[in-house]
Image: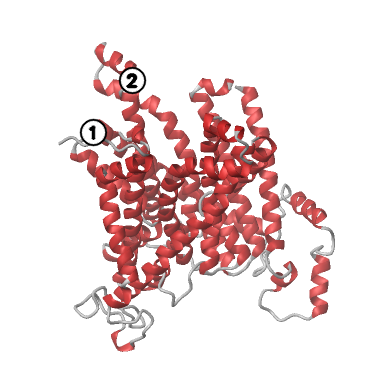
């Protein structure tokens, strides 16, 4: 297990380096030079522009600028926001809690809904329960998350007044966004759970388990679900990416002060240091999650370790 | 009466497709939507951009079936004309994804070795940015507008195509017909385009169809965030975004454009599922 973990950790390094290069180059790929972007829409004299170019180190070769950028990352120096001059790290730090809370809650919703819908329709295969669950899942796959979110706000906060529509803090502000985000992911999960449970149900060891007189609940829990879980974990790992990018949209609809909303707002206002910081952060989280998924995968299925 | 299963692959696929209920439902709905998009001006007496302040924020009624927006524009008309924009957006995005992804997958799978490794590195890098994030990065660089949104969605969907094409090419590269083509002196280019590419068509068609559904949602999401189509363009996501501030007083401005997106995406997904089963009967449960 240890060599596998080490190898997998080493493999994540080139990925992060490549991501940092992309994020660094972003600023230089934008038409116009970074100093002009720095001033945004303000009028500026050529002398002042030249001064800022010097200060930003834009006169130096690109690789040197990149190394400077990378050296800043471990120190937490990601630059400052163009608009309010606060450090990017500070902006990220104040928003991570809200995003993490949303992602976690949505993840729980997705697993709970996806597992129960998928399992239910696999066990009641061919009945209306199956058809209904799969129709719900197909609806979930086809539904734009921002529409579901808006509809939830309309019904549960504007009409019924059960939950506040926007903001962060307290569990009641979390219910609607977590459900909206979780539901979309649960749809894909439900379809997968159904097919992998059906696959496992047909295997000989299930027949063995049943024929030795185990109760059905034990057969399902101990034998079927455990084996169907490997596929589920892989997909949930991949789904985490969908969850992250869905969070960007969900946060905007519910006006939650999270990293996703920060990113979207920064793109609209051309606040590039913030865009770079947020993209770097989300990509980093994604790489770490994928790493954890791979590791748990190897833990659950020993065959993978020895590949 | 017993009918024989047709011999040729494309006939077989069509034959199975016609028996698929989901493909049937999907293509009927989609056909109706496409027809409505083409015939839009014939189906409504209003103009999508015509402002009528007296009629502002009217709930659905006999004159305005789906109500009106804050400027008195007829919502049904705007959704109808929006279907032109949104369906096109989906198609163009997927075309962009195909134009990038298919050659990448072909080259990587066919040549293997260094070409394969470096192209797949690029694909892996693109996949490090989950979902809509890569599109957001591209929009940040290119600036927000509808064409850039299509480009961004297309580029971020391309790695999926590259991977699938590569996998198919890898398995067909070793087939006897490729060896035969090489033996009669075909160039690499000819083998790739005339012999291998047609064999990768099945997954491309399936993934491409499902991709249109994904692209419509992604592009609508970008427009909703204000990073795609700009008002007054009646793109579906942009319509939803316009309704956002009027949710309390005008539920129809949000409800109906969303239903339109869902109907289109659902029908394309149904068709895609049917196509997948038709191309690969083994996958059918």
Q: Residue at x 56, y 45 (%)?
A: B193
Q: CA distance from mark 2 to mark 1?
A: 16 Å
Q: Which residue is mark 1?
A: A125
In what quadrant of the picture does the N terminus of chain B appear? Answer: top left
Location of residue B141 (image quadrant): bottom right
In what quadrant of the picture does the C terminus of chain B appear? Answer: top left
Which residue is farthest left?
B1
Q: Which residue is mark 2?
A: A203
Q: Nearer the viewer, residue B199 or A236?
A: B199
Q: Position of residue A45 (x, y in %)?
A: 78, 81
Q: Which mark is residue A216?
A: none
Q: Which colour assignment does the render follow?
A: secondary structure
What secondary structure is marked by label 1?
loop
Name the subunit of mark 1.
A
Task: Assess whether mark 1 and mark 2 are in contact (beta carbons under 8 angstroms).
Answer: no
Can you say whether B73 is above or below A134 in the image? below
Can you say whether A284 is above or below B41 in the image? above
Horizontal side, residue B270 vs residue A284: left or right: left
Q: Position of residue A244 (x, y in %)?
A: 50, 50
């Amino acid at each position: 297990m240890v060599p596998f973990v080490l190898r997998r950790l080493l493999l994540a390094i080139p990925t992060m380096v490549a991501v940092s290069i992309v994020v660094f180059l972003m600023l230089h790929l934008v038409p116009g030079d970074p100093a002009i972007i720095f001033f945004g829409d303000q009028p500026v004299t050529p002398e002042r522009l030249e001064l800022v170019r010097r200060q930003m180190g834009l006169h130096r070769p690109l690789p040197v600028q990149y190394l400077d950028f990378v050296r800043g990352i471990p120190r937490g120096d990601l630059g400052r926001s163009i608009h309010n001059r606060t450090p990017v790290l500070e902006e990220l730090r104040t928003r991570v809690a809200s995003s993490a809370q949303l992602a976690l809650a949505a993840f729980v919703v997705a697993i709970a809904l996806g597992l129960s819908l998928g399992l239910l329709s696999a066990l009641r295969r061919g009945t209306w329960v199956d058809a209904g669950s799969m129709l719900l899942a197909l609806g979930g796959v086809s539904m734009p998350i921002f529409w579901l979110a808006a509809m939830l706000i309309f019904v549960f906060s504007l009409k019924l007044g059960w939950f506040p529509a926007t903001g962060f803090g307290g569990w009641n502000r979390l219910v609607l966004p977590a459900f909206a985000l979780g539901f979309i992911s649960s749809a894909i999960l439900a379809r997968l759970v159904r097919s992998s449970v059906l696959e496992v149900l047909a295997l000989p060891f299930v027949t063995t388990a049943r024929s030795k007189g185990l109760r059905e609940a034990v057969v399902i829990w101990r034998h079927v679900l455990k084996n169907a879980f490997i596929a589920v974990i892989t997909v949930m790992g991949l789904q985490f990416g969908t969850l992250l990018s869905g969070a960007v949209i969900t946060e905007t609809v519910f006006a939650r002060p999270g990293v996703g909303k920060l990113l979207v707002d920064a793109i609209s206002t051309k606040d590039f240091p913030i865009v770079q910081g947020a993209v770097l952060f989300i990509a980093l989280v994604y790489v770490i999650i994928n790493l954890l998924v791979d590791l748990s995968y190897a833990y659950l299925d020993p065959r993978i370790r020895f590949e | 009466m017993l009918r024989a299963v047709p011999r040729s692959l494309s006939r077989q696929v069509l034959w199975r497709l016609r028996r698929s209920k989901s493909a049937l439902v999907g293509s009927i709905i989609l056909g109706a939507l496409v027809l409505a998009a083409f015939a839009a001006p014939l189906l409504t007496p209003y103009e999508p951009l015509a402002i009528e302040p007296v009629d502002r924020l009217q709930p659905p009624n006999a004159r305005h079936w789906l109500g009106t927006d804050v400027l008195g524009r007829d919502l049904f008309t705007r959704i109808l004309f929006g279907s032109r924009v949104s369906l096109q957006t989906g198609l163009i995005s997927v075309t962009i994804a195909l134009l990038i992804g298919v050659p990448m997958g072909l080259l990587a799978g066919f040549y293997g070795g260094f070409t394969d490794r470096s192209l797949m590195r690029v694909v892996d890098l693109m996949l490090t940015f989950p979902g809509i994030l890569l599109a957001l990065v591209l929009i940040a660089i290119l600036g927000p507008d509808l064409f850039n949104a299509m480009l961004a969605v297309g580029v971020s969907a391309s790695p999926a195509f590259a991977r699938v094409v590569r996998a198919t090419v890898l398995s067909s590269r070793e087939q006897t017909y490729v060896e035969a083509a090489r033996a009669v002196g075909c160039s690499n280019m000819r083998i790739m385009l005339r012999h291998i590419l047609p064999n990768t068509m099945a997954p491309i068609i399936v993934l491409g169809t499902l991709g249109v559904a994904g692209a419509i949602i992604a592009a609508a999401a970008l427009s909703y965030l204000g990073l795609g189509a700009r008002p007054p363009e009646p793109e579906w996501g942009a319509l939803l975004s316009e309704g956002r501030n009027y949710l309390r007083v005008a539920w129809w401005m949000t409800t109906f454009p969303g239903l339109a997106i869902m109907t289109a995406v659902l029908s394309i997904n149904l068709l895609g599922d049917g196509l997948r089963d038709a191309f690969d009967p083994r996958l059918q449960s």
